[in-house]
């Protein structure tokens, strides 16, 4: 086996190597106003009930909305929404109605006040189940209380943030037989 030549890598860019999952849109709702932000720092923590850990910067408008209401929706877009997802991520709900500006369609959720996004192939209604790490790390633990998918979207291609405006699109699926199902 040939030995690889390794080169030092910038610590400021490490997150781009480990981004855990697809870019999602996070919706919140407070005082009659809905907001949406783009997020890529999230990870599954448990299967049943589904628990998701996520980081939302305390500089983001959505941080205080999620912290005060304790609920949100994680809407999962496919690659056809990449330009909208980037636009949402580059603006703030403090100043504009991002749903209107980017043409996103709100749909009512069943278990939370935050809206679903019709254009996304999946929507996860969530409640903050643990906030012990929020003040120190901006890390929320969410429990999924209701999940929705669009059956018309059979093989969605998600986008994954690599940093500094670079994204990867999920591609070909492979199957490797596993002992467990």
Image (spheres, rainbow, N blue to C red):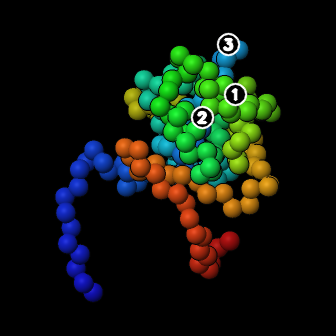
Which residue is at 44% across, 25% downward?
Answer: 58
> Where in the figure is residue 64, as x and y percent of width and height?
53, 20
Q: Nearer the viewer, residue 120 or 61?
A: 120
Q: CA distance from mark 2 to mark 1?
A: 9 Å
Image x and y of residue 4, in percent: 23, 75
- 2 with respect to 20 (left or right): left
Which of the two discs, 3 and 1, labels the residue nearer the N terminus? 3
Residue density around tag 3, few if under 14, some if 14–19, many if 20 or more, within 10 Å: few
| Circle on res. 32 | none
Quarter of the image for the N terminus: give it: bottom left
Mark 3 highlights which residue?
31
Quadrant containing the C terminus in the rendered view: bottom right
The CA span between labels 3 and 1 is: 11 Å
Residue furthest bottom in the image: 1
Q: Secondary structure under badge 1?
A: loop
Instruction: Say which residue label 2 marks.
Output: 26
Residue tagged 1: 114
Residue 108: x %, y % from top left: 79, 30
Residue 113 sits above or below residue 75 on the image: above
Kindly state the secondary structure of the residue where label 2 is placed: strand
Camera-side residue: 115 or 82? 82
77 with respect to 109 (left or right): left
Badge 2 density bin: few <14, some 14–19, many ≥20, Cα 10 Å: many
Compared across the picture, whether 24 is left or right of 155 comes to: left
- Residue 11 in picture, x, y percent from top left: 25, 48
Q: Say whether disc 2 or disc 3 marks the residue closer to the N-terminus.
A: 2
């Amino acid at each position: 086996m040939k030995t690889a030549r390794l080169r030092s890598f910038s610590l400021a860019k490490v997150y781009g190597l480990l981004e855990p999952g697809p870019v999602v849109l996070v919706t919140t709702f407070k005082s009659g106003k809905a907001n949406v932000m783009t997020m890529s720092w999230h990870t599954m923590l448990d299967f049943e009930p589904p628990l998701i850990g996520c980081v939302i910067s305390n500089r983001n408008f959505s941080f205080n909305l999620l912290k005060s209401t304790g609920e949100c929706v994680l809407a999962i877009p496919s690659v056809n929404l990449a330009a909208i997802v980037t636009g949402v991520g580059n603006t703030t709900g403090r100043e504009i109605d991002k749903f209107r500006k980017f043409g996103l369609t709100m749909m009512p959720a069943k278990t939370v006040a935050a809206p679903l996004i019709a254009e996304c192939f999946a929507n996860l209604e969530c409640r903050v189940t643990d906030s012990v790490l929020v003040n120190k790390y901006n890390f929320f633990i969410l429990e999924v209380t209701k999940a929705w998918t669009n059956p018309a979207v059979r093989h969605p291609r998600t986008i994954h943030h690599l940093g500094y405006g670079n994204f990867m699109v999920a591609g070909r699926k492979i199957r490797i037989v596993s002992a467990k199902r």
